[in-house]
Amino acid sequence: MKVQRLLQINMAALVALGTLLLGMGQRSGWLATIVIVAAATSVYFTDILEQFQLSRRAANILAVVAVAMFLHDFLPADRPGYLPAIANLLIYLQIIHLYRKKTIRIYWQLAMLSLLQVVVAAVVSAGFEFGPLLVIYMFVALSALCLFFLYRETVRYAPRDLAETDGHWQRPLTAPLAPPPGRMTDHPSDRALGWAMIWQIVKMGLASIAFTLAVFFAVPRVGSMLYRDTVSDQQAVVGFSTEISLDQIGDIIRSDQSVMRVHFVDHEKGTTYELRQEPYFRGATLTEYSPKGRSADWKMAHRDRRRRLQPGHSIEDLIRVEIVLEPDRKRALFGMLPIYQIDESTNPIRVERRTGHLFFSDRSRPKSSEPFRYVFGTTGFGKGFRGGYDRLITPLAKGQQPRSLEALTAWDEDKLPLLKELADDIIAQDKLSNEFVRGVEPRFYRVQALERHFRYNSPYTYSLQRPPKQNRPPGNPIDPTEDFIANHRTGHCEFFASALTLMLRSQGIPARIVVGYKGGEFNSVGEYYQVKRLDAHAWVEAYLEPKQVPASMLREDEPRDVGAWVRLDPTPGTDRSDADQARGGVIGRLIELFEYGQVLWTDYVLELNWDRQKKAIYDPIYAELSLLVRDLLSWEVWSHLPIGIARTLGIDVYGRATGRWFSWRAGLTAMSVCLVLVGVFRLVRSPIGRLIVWIASRRPAAKSRRSLRIEFYRRLETVLARHGMKRAATQTQREFALEAAGQLTESPSCRHAASMPRRVVEAFYRVRFGGHALDKHEAEAVEHALTSLEEALSADAQNAAGNGG
Amino acid sequence: MFVNRHTAICRECWYYLFILSFIVGGAILRDINLLIAVSAMMIGPLLFSWRFVIVSLRRLDVRRRLPDGICAGDLLVVDVTAVNGRRRLGSWSVVVEDQIHRDDTAKANDRKTAKVMFPYVAAGDDQTSAYHGRLTRRGRYRFGPLKVSTRFPLGLIRRTVVVDQIDDLVVCPRLGRLAPGWSQMLHTDRLSSHRSQRRRGSLEADFYGLRNWRTGDSRRWIHWRTSAKRGELFVRQFEQQRNQDLALFLDLWQPANPSQEQLEHVELVVSFAATVVADVCRRGASQLYVGAAGRTVSSVGGAASMVLLQEVMAQLAVTEAGDEDRLPGLLDRSLNEVRPGTKMMVIGTRPTTMSDTDRFAAVWDDPQKRNAIRQIVCVDVAGDELAQYFQVEPSRQDQSP
């Protein structure tokens, strides 16, 4: 049976899609892969070939095993672990059911499990691809349900065995009444398949999508988000840490999970400000280096007082930075120096002036499940000939000087001799680094020389792989930073930053590590930077005394009597300019579109809330409707509309230009408008007619009963009219019946039915004018009369046709 | 024809709504937007399904066609035709339910339902399907109303249209086979009933051939076409038949609380009589009289013909047994109507003795009827003698295709 085969395939596809959705949500591909393989093999071996089918007992045993595995995962798990355990149980059960002989019960269970999978997937999924896949799933589900229904109906109305009857006289009223097998095809439901059915499923799917969109965006979100925290725990955590540990890093997996979205806007012009260089988003500064044998940690300094941002409205060349931070459990804010407050209405944030750390204010701290928006201003970008470049040097404002330089120059020469040795060599070889001006050491050039050593002129390579094991004995380990510069010379940004910081300190230069994000991908569609987890970065900031800051690096309005921080990025090969070039063309555009889609998905689907609904949906619709109503009620608009249209078409309505009273163009336009109006009327007329019929059908029941009662007279007129007997407008029903009887008498085959019209009309008079309801016998008599009349007229028509032939 | 329409939620839909309520609840309580989307994706098809089942049955005309007449136990085939009057939309999985019940019974469990499914009726097209079965008891059956329903596409919502199309069907008594003893019984008495053997006119006899014209032949017998072809006169030959006139009196008595065996005896009487009547009417050329004494007394008679057969069958189909002895009344009324020389037979559910002057006092008191009652042959279906005349046909369902 074709329906059954299609159902088997469809159900397998449904199961595979449901698991795929779930796998995407869990970011786990292996179970989804197993189910897809199981779905394909079960269709072929279990359903088509019927070579492998789990017996009921085997299925029950496997189900018990699945439950045991579920309990093993579920019982020790915390709340976030419950859903994955449940999801896995659903998958185990589905695999078992796929290999069973398909019965209606099994199909129900498969469909139910698949639906539950989608529900779980909806809870844990955040990816944009969930949307398109859900739509595909819906179409497959509708198709599967249609086929399942047809299959059930086929089984339900299958011809039965007729040998059930007994042989006695006093037997049941009837023997089984069933469709005869000989009169129908073996599988009648196959007739239902075809393009017409596919089209109906497509229509149903499209209508459902339209309904879903309308409901989704129209239903106001007034929820209290009571349980969102537990739900968001399922989501992956953004990988930002306020500590660096140089021993734990094995192979690092790059994650493309989104961290934040950043808009740079020219505060004066209001236009998007696109950088020519990758921006650095500072998260935390690490000052304390703690070597621990083969490992070492970098930690933050003691917390300072958190203050409001300084107002920056009056500052020139201010760049407005708008950041939307994705949900995260370990929430940290990112910014850049210097930082100013420019928008009072957005979420307030606080700053630790000496380090530049940003913090939530007490009022603005969000729940970990909500994205967080904040805005600040900065002058950290050069303009003019350097337009759009992130500045290397950030002069300090008052109160931002480091409280103590000791912590920034902390250095243990005994433990880290190789670093100082190397730094001395590098500086000694660099000419600029040794040219003292007025007795002041050229610190700016020294730090740049050290940076260049790692970044450009050295055998160091950037790698996310685990560093090779040390050959030293356990009792005499080497510091991981020294091991890096002396031995393997391979590592990620934290090794480079750590090495440079320590080398700077070995030269007496205050330095600290900054962790945060670098760069991000600029999306030209949405004009924003998409910063992902893989953009996490560590770099170095070195402190310059006021005399050591090159004047050319400062703006004219910036003070010369304060120190400055120089940003140094020693990690080689982290510029994304090459990657940006590779992303050009159609593929790059597609990637950008996909990323923009992800943003829209997050903003308007996952995180759609009342404020966003109001701003993006309700308010525009209300404004448009208000405008429309105002225009519809405005006489002025209506009076000027034809003339406006004519002018738009270039028609001189009053003939002022030509002086002629007739215009061909105006005439043609008027004719076209009339034709369009006629067309619109014809299009609208049918729905209006249907509406009137629909309203009429909703009248009180008494009226409809009455109309039903006299339906038999309409049928009489229809039957007679079909054979050329129509009631004239001047005839009463009785006169018409008499005339019809006369005509019927003339035909031998209709003679016996001559009295029937009269009988029907008499009944009609009783109902229509006498208010009398026909009882059962009267109704039967009328029905009999009409049937006899129909048969007589049909026979007469056949005779006439036979004679004619 | 009256039409009643209604829409109902199926059991599967309640399950569907149950699951949906959980998802909606989860979406609201946890404020998870994707669950709201999933909920809407479940509600959408439900609403579409509701609209679709309503539209599916609009302008869908369903008709039933019954056979002209059948006997109990015969195969009944009822054609059902669905005509889709719409221009665009087809109808899927349309189920037509037909109600069947005997007219004389008020038992609810005697009401049976036959179902026919139309997998697909394309727009502007018509499809004919059929259901079949066996009506195992004689009587007048009423078919209808027709219930037309569909649950397509998802099987969640059912739309039903009840079309008050009522048809009647008379199911005749079941026919058996006359044994050789029946014919012998008729011919045994032939010599003693010369007067009843009527010579029929040649035109009423069966035509069997042509021969040359002989002197004395009627001109009406000349076959003009053959004569013209051959160039000499030819006349038609007829087979002369002589058949026995017959009067059957059915004693359909049963006690007030009959046993299963007694009920079967009643059916045997009726079946035997119907078989005899069918045989006589098929042969023709005789007079037939049938009277039944059951709950009521009824009789019908005339020249044996197919018309009479239908009339008698219709009467036998609805004849019911009674617990009163109405046979004497029937005989008293009927013996005057039966021609002299007619073979008379009483077929009853119990032994009957015509010499019982007490029971048949009214007949024995009448000198004219007294002679006739002596010639009546009595057959008790409960006794062994029935087997000489009549055999019940084996169940026909085994012979059906």
Image (cartoon, helix red, strand yellow):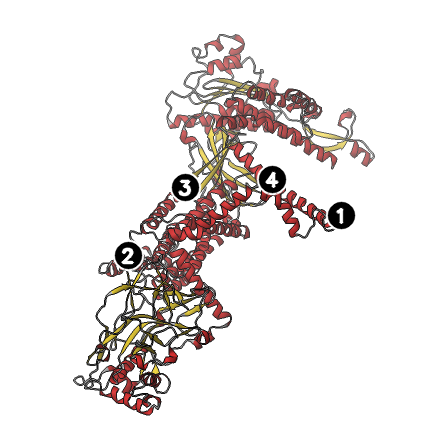
- Residue A63 sits in quarter: bottom left
In the rendered view, does A524 fall on the left or right side of A392?
right
Q: Nearer the viewer, residue A455 or A187?
A: A455
Look at mark 3 in the image and give the residue it sits on: B10
Give the residue drawn at x 55%, y 31%: B69
Badge 3: how crowded within 10 Å, few (<14), some, or many (20+)? Answer: some
Mark 2–mark 1 distance (CA, rounded to whole Å): 74 Å
Mark closer to the observer (2, 1)? 1
The residue where tag 4 is placed is A685
Q: Secondary structure at mark 2?
A: loop
| Residues at marks 1 and 4, CA–CA distance in whole angstroms | 38 Å
Q: Earlier in the sequence, mark 2 or mark 1?
A: 2
Give the labeled residue for mark 2: A363
Residue depicted at x 34% and y 79%: A569
Q: Are marks 2 and 1 in contact (CB under 8 Å)?
A: no
Q: Residues within 10 Å of mark 4 (few under 14, many from 20)?
A: few
Mark nearest the camera among 3 and 4 is 4
